[in-house]
């Protein structure tokens, strides 16, 4: 039996495995479940925060659908991280604040045949405690406990045994973790490096709806995702969205930096294909590249996650005396009902009044406020608010605090399939790279003529990259899968200094494809066989189209 480690978690640090570079602080990982209840791991969403002292905090959102008794989640870690819970609400608000936004500003030249019924608007892209007393001899328990809706355990496995991955799986199964033997071989590389395994399961009273992100505090190192175990339950083209907080803009140190081709985005309906464009771009990089969707100061995102107004509202609630005002208190809590943990908290603290069905009551407590009095047995406002502070409010405030403490935030996104998960992404920082705005704007001019309806009129769109794309009606002319139109404008290898080295430049190929397409879109007069057009209708021929595009490119340079 290996010796068990005890003592303060905060004193443990990440052990170095590479003498020439910081050790990646590992987070995230793979789902394991029995074959009859496959896990739906639709996306990985992670927040990494690298503090001034080099230590790393990771917040990891867990996606799961299935029976709560089949839930198990496991990841390799260095040392023994400090374990806590975070909030799905924090992730939702952060994603909304940093989603790519593609705005199409539209003007109309000339007069079309029918009244204007076009309403231009921008659109957002989707972004696109166990039993620790026993174990097989090669397995030791380093830490175990309960946090939020989870039981968890940290185990170490003797890497000298023939099959350390199988030993770990067997121990976890024997101790009530519903993990599958499939994928044990993927753990070998981590266990052989001396890493430990952190496993979660839901507590007896928790259901799948109570799953929350986990918060892990590591020692010093670089943020890294051990993506290889994730291949066990990954869907095809699974999204991986990462926010990295640090002193400067974050870079994918061992993956490629992908600059998307503006012309492949459907600017008229960007929700239609943004994720497809990212997937094609990642595939063009062999499944090992990230798009930098946003990079800039972190402080504004703290307010998006946990607004000062909500913090003040909760402080006011705690300052009041709610004796004989319990119904009023519950009404005030309605603005917090969407936060993680609130439903469980209210079910625990607020008894159901006589004559009301439980589900009806907790589904609409405001509907029954008039029937709640000070005589409700077991309702203790002080205890309710204190539990709310620790279980609901603190995870939101702590997440926002990371964005106040650390100056710079970078959002990176990619998609991967299982066969592409062969190398763990590591993130470093580069002070020479500039900000990346998540808001993108293009200008569209609809070319009207007397014989053309607005829905049939041709248009030209001036892209941020400088190209001009022509099209007709509400259709975008390019789609993913067309071999002549790549999804990446440039692919770079980026280090900790400088702008990086361009290893694939598709700008000329993109320009040639656009020019060839534009030549096939006649101006409105030619398209409808008219001999004249309204003033300002821009009846250009092929040479004019070529000149227009080239002019726009020169202007952008």
Image: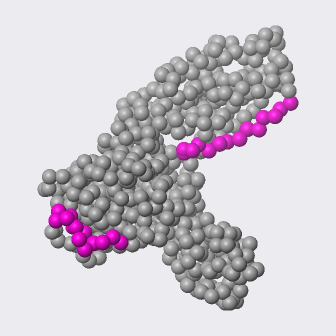
Q: Quadrant of residue 123?
A: top right
Q: Is residue 120 above or below residue 479?
A: below
The front one of 286 and 554 is 286
Q: Is residue 203 magenta?
A: no
Q: Is residue 104 visible?
A: yes
Q: Along the horizontal axis of the image, is 1 left or right of 485?
A: left
User: Percent position (x, y) of residue 160?
Assistant: 13, 56
Q: Is residue 25 above or below residue 538?
A: below
Q: Along the horizontal axis of the image, is 107 left or right of 306?
A: right
Q: Is residue 148 above or below residue 260?
A: below
User: Percent position (x, y) of residue 145?
Assistant: 35, 73
Q: Is residue 424 visible?
A: no
Q: Is residue 360 above or below residue 21?
A: below
User: Percent position (x, y) of residue 206?
Assistant: 48, 68
Residue drawn 59% across the image and 75% down it: 346
Residue drawn 48% across the image and 22% down it: 483
Residue drawn 56% across the image and 27% down it: 479
The front one of 326 and 544 is 326
Q: Is residue 140 magenta?
A: yes
Q: Quadrant of residue 406?
A: bottom left
Q: Quadrant of residue 12?
A: bottom left
Residue drawn 30% across the image and 57% down it: 76
User: Percent position (x, y) of residue 529?
Assistant: 79, 10
The region drawn magenta spans 115-141
């Amino acid at each position: 039996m290996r010796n068990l480690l005890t003592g303060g978690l905060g004193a443990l640090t990440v052990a170095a495995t590479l003498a020439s570079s910081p050790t990646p602080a590992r987070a995230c990982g793979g789902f394991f479940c029995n074959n009859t209840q496959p896990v739906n791991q639709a996306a990985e969403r992670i927040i990494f925060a690298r503090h001034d002292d080099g230590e790393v905090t990771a917040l990891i959102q867990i996606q799961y659908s299935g029976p709560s008794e089949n839930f198990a989640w496991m990841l390799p870690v260095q040392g023994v991280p400090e374990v806590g819970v975070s909030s799905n609400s924090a992730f939702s608000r952060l994603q909304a604040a940093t989603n790519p936004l593609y705005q199409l500003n539209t003007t109309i030249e000339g007069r079309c045949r029918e009244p204007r019924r076009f309403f231009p608007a921008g659109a957002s892209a989707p972004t696109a405690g166990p039993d620790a007393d026993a174990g097989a001899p090669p397995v030791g328990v380093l830490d175990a406990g309960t946090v939020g809706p989870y039981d968890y355990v940290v185990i170490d496995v003797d890497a000298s045994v023939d099959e350390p991955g199988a030993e770990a799986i067997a121990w976890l199964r024997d101790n009530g973790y519903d993990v599958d033997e499939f994928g044990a071989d993927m753990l070998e590389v981590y266990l052989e490096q001396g890493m430990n395994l952190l496993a979660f399961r839901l507590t007896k009273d928790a259901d799948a709806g109570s799953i929350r992100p986990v918060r892990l505090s590591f020692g010093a190192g670089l943020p890294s995702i051990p993506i290889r175990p994730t291949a066990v339950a990954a869907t095809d083209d699974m999204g991986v969205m990462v926010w990295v907080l640090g002193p400067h803009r974050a870079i994918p140190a061992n993956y490629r930096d992908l600059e998307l081709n503006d012309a492949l985005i459907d600017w008229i309906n960007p929700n239609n294909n943004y994720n497809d464009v990212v997937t094609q771009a990642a595939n063009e990089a062999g499944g090992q590249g990230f798009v930098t969707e946003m990079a800039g100061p972190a402080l504004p995102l703290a307010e998006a996650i946990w607004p000062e107004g909500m913090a003040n509202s909760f402080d006011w609630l705690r300052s009041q005396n709610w004796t004989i005002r319990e119904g009023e208190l519950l009404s005030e809590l309605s603005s917090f009902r969407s936060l993680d943990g609130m439903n469980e908290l209210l079910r625990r603290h607020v008894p159901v009044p006589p004559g009301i069905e439980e589900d009806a009551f907790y589904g609409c407590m405001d509907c029954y406020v008039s029937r709640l009095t000070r005589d409700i047995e077991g309702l203790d406002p002080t205890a309710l608010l204190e539990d709310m502070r620790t279980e609901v409010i603190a995870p939101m405030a702590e997440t926002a605090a990371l964005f106040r403490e650390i100056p710079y935030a970078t959002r990176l996104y990619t998609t991967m399939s299982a066969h592409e998960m062969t190398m763990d992404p590591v993130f470093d920082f580069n002070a020479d790279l500039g900000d990346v705005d998540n808001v993108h704007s293009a200008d569209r001019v609809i070319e009207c003529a007397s014989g053309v309806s607005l829905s049939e009129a041709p248009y030209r769109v001036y892209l941020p990259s400088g190209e001009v794309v022509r099209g007709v009606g509400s259709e975008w002319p390019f789609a993913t899968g067309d071999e002549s139109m790549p999804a990446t404008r440039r692919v770079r290898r980026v280090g900790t200094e400088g702008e990086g080295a361009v290893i694939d430049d598709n700008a000329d190929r993109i320009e040639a494809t656009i020019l060839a397409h534009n030549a096939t879109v006649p101006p409105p007069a030619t398209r409808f066989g008219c001999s004249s057009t309204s003033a300002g209708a821009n009846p250009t021929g092929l040479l004019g189209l070529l000149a227009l595009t080239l002019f726009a490119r020169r202007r952008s340079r």
